[in-house]
Image (tube, coloured by chain):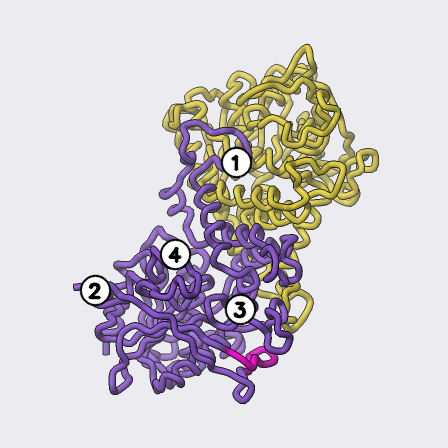
Chain colours: A purple, B yellow
Amino acid sequence: MEDKLFTNVKHVTLADKNNPFYLEIAGHIDDVVVEYETYGELSPAKDNAILIAHALSGDAHAAGWDLDWEKYNRPWRENKPGWWDTIIGPGKPLDTNKYFIICSNVVGSCYGTTGPSSIDPESGRPYGLDFPIVTVGDWVNLQRRLIDFLAIDKLLCVIGGSLGGQQALEWALAYPDRLHKCAILASAPRLSSQGLAFNAVGRHSIMHDPNFNDGNYYDREAPSNGLAAARMLAHITYLSEEGMQHKFGRRLRGKMQPDFDFGVEFEVESYLNYQGQRFVERFDANSYLYITKAMDYYDAAEKWGAGDIVEAVKRIECQTLVATFSSDWLYTPEQGREIAQALVKNNKRATYLSVESKFGHDAFLVETESVGRFLRAFLGSK
Amino acid sequence: MEDKLFTNVKHVTLADKNNPFYLEIAGHIDDVVVEYETYGELSPAKDNAILIAHALSGDAHAAGWDLDWEKYNRPWRENKPGWWDTIIGPGKPLDTNKYFIICSNVVGSCYGTTGPSSIDPESGRPYGLDFPIVTVGDWVNLQRRLIDFLAIDKLLCVIGGSLGGQQALEWALAYPDRLHKCAILASAPRLSSQGLAFNAVGRHSIMHDPNFNDGNYYDREAPSNGLAAARMLAHITYLSEEGMQHKFGRRLRGKMQPDFDFGVEFEVESYLNYQGQRFVERFDANSYLYITKAMDYYDAAEKWGAGDIVEAVKRIECQTLVATFSSDWLYTPEQGREIAQALVKNNKRATYLSVESKFGHDAFLVETESVGRFLRAFLGSK
């Protein structure tokens, strides 16, 4: 029996002048508002809280139907539930009848949490590129403040996919005594050279868009063409060659014969164009720069083990699940397995799941059935 | 004993008003000049001619040192021999003491053969996007005119890698009685869905560069940022994940600590930026559009076998070599093998070579030793 889940957007100020938010790399932000959502009820013993960490373009709206989409002018949410709605809800694998689920938007993003599009209290104008560089570590530190604010001592679990999986890993490393379990999906200790390369090209497109104007575009036209190009490119890395071949092949877009011009000919071109166009309606180009930078810089082995992941994970105390997807070539199975192997070498409680899928990196969002099943089992395990 | 090879650029008019060049898709070009180079001497029996077909960004300068680099203002050739100089030359696998080697620039390109940057005799201005759509079939038809002009009845071999491999395949299909042998390297009967996607994003970058101006930019600033982005992206597809990891890893560019800004941080970013910058100095953005379009449209199975490659290759009479490279993910080993398997199913003389390499698609240019060895053997075989 699954009820429809309706959600409200929540905001909390987690840093101010008297309690600045110090950043990993340099400096601090004096004023940090966090947007978050919760689903289900926190138990009296406060032992049923699960934190969900979102990926690059994600937000706090992980599940259900947003009752506030008009209030915050987010029309794309009107006819679409949260990004992991297949997994989170009453009776679903992350069962909101049992668990209290929290998801917050990361700092630097553009969905209600302070980021480059927020007003810099010093200048009275949007930060733009004056926003400081933020890291996966900062995101986790801010989530820790949120958990403190919610008066939760120890999370039952932190779960994330992709860049969210790196946040889950970072939680286990940075706050080993604050979580019982950790589920890292479609992720890696660090981005590969090829991944760095794709991010670099995406940022190149944004920063060379003539509307970019050094990040100062909030009162004029945004660098939409550059952002669309970055998104189109990134989308290729979220799918697999096999998945694209299956979904689009070389089929033409709505015609029997090509037009033989420079318009859209193939289904796959049409799909990418569509993804690019939809993205610029809902995402801020500066946030794209900051979040891909955080993605580039994160290296769990370097940060916690002087380059050695086996050394790094010695800190981890929680029970860990690592799941990878066979056709994921952004965070490959080999990279994910590295985390699990390092844990096993240290005699830590680790489970490694290799999921067969043609959906590439997107599999953690798409392979609802297997992801739901193994998350349910992992949460139920002692 | 290897002598240094010096080369001269040659031009020939292969179409004019009295003998227009009819195109596969539509229309004709009345005035076609072809730039080509030759190495070695044509034997009296005219039985030692090998045609080399170049890839996307290639040119007729396949080997040796260009004596005309100043004359044609091509400074990048001053300190660099032709693109397959490791393979072609006196004593080299394609031995110019034995063979007469021909390489010509394809129509639509920008290295001396008629293309979008050439003057349209009708308007007196550069063609730009008024240039007609050209295909792999057109390239081969024009090469056939060149071979006729050189009075060669039957080529000893046609050899090409990547898009050049598709030209070699097309030669075998379109003119089965005009070649004895055909070597198809790092190629496929058609581009995959993922390959179409990468090309689409590259063209998106060019066509959304504000300097693009519908392809009319020859008297002003060129759309260099868009072209650079397209090239950077394409370069990722020419390397392999493993190769990039090995060559660049996550190493920083000339520093011990990151700068934590939006400049170049990693080696791999620096490499891609460099490749992008060098490319815009030597390539025309419109040519990039036309050539990637030809790459998109080519489908040997569709053209010659109503979608069935086994049916298509029934036409082939020459001895065929197909070589693929293990880490090539642009034209994968599976795709190349399809050609060889189709030939074998038809009891044709085909050899398939699967070369282990970490150099990705670029392997046909980089794996000098193995490529040289198998080409030498293939040419020597009866």
Q: Disc 4 sits on a residue from what chain? A: A
Q: Where in the figure is residue A260, as x and y percent of width and height? A: 52, 29
Q: Secondary structure beneath disc 2?
A: loop
The furthest residue to the front: A71
Q: CA distance from mark 1 to mark 4?
A: 28 Å
Asked whether, in this view, residue B30 is left or right of residue A270, the answer is right
Residue A54 visible (yes or no): yes
Residue A24 on the magenta segment: yes
Q: Where in the figure is residue B248, as x and y percent of width and height? A: 59, 60
Q: Where in the figure is residue A90, as x and y percent of width and height? A: 22, 68
Residue A104 or residue B23, whichever sits in front: A104
Q: Secondary structure beneath disc 1?
A: loop
- Relative to residue B108, is residue B18 depicted above or below? above
Q: Secondary structure beneath disc 4?
A: helix
Q: Amino acid at mark 1?
A: Gly
In terms of sequence position, does the residue under pointer 3 or pointer 1 come before the other?
A: 1
Determine contact: label 1, label 4, CB under 8 Å: no
Residue drawn at point x = 71 percent, y = 42 percent: B222
Q: Amino acid at mark 2?
A: Asp
Which residue does the numbered mark 2 point to in the structure image? A3
Prevailing secondary structure class for the magenta stretch in the rendered image: loop
Q: CA distance from mark 2 to mark 1?
A: 45 Å
Q: CA distance from mark 3 to mark 1?
A: 35 Å
Which residue does the numbered mark 1 point to in the structure image? A263
